[in-house]
Image (tube, grey):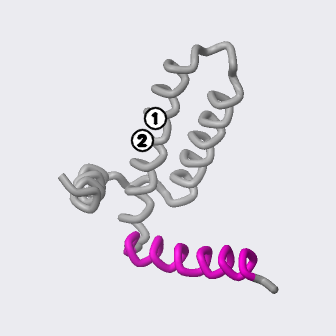
Amino acid sequence: MHFEELWEKCEEVNKDDNTKISSLIDEIMMKCNLYKVIEENESIPEEERKNVKSRTLGEILFALTNLSLQDNIDVFDALSTAFKYRSIEKYTKKYQS
């Protein structure tokens, strides 16, 4: 399965979810904060921490599919545009005379 197909399947699962945008953003922020806590918790063995971070990132991405669905965002175009501007920034800084 291609990533695009997976994204669309996740959006389909979220199709009947009427969570408000502000609640989705709160959920994404909470999961990002959880990811940060996991990253900073050195008492968790490295392999286990890697697995928990992977699962948490998956949950963040899944929540983002709900956001993109509800706001009807073309995520390919959005990411492509961000990449274009970020790469211009990066290479401009890198090759300044």
The residue that disc 1 covers is: 54
> 94 left or right of 81?
right
Q: Residue placed at 25% from the left, 53% from the top?
A: 6
Q: Crowding at label 2, few (<14), some or many (≥20) Cα neighbours within 10 Å?
A: few
Q: Quadrant of residue 4?
A: bottom left
Q: Is residue 74 above or below residue 18?
A: below
Choose between 20 and 77: the one closer to the eye.
77
Q: Residue placed at 50% from the left, 80% from the top?
A: 81
The residue that disc 2 covers is: 58
Residue 26: image x %, image y %?
Answer: 60, 49
Choose between 85 and 62: the one closer to the eye.
85
> 85 left or right of 51?
right
Q: Amino acid at mark 1?
A: Ser
Q: Nearer the viewer, mark 2 or mark 1?
A: 1
- Is disc 1 placed on a helix, strand or loop? helix
The secondary structure that most of the magenta stretch takes on is helix
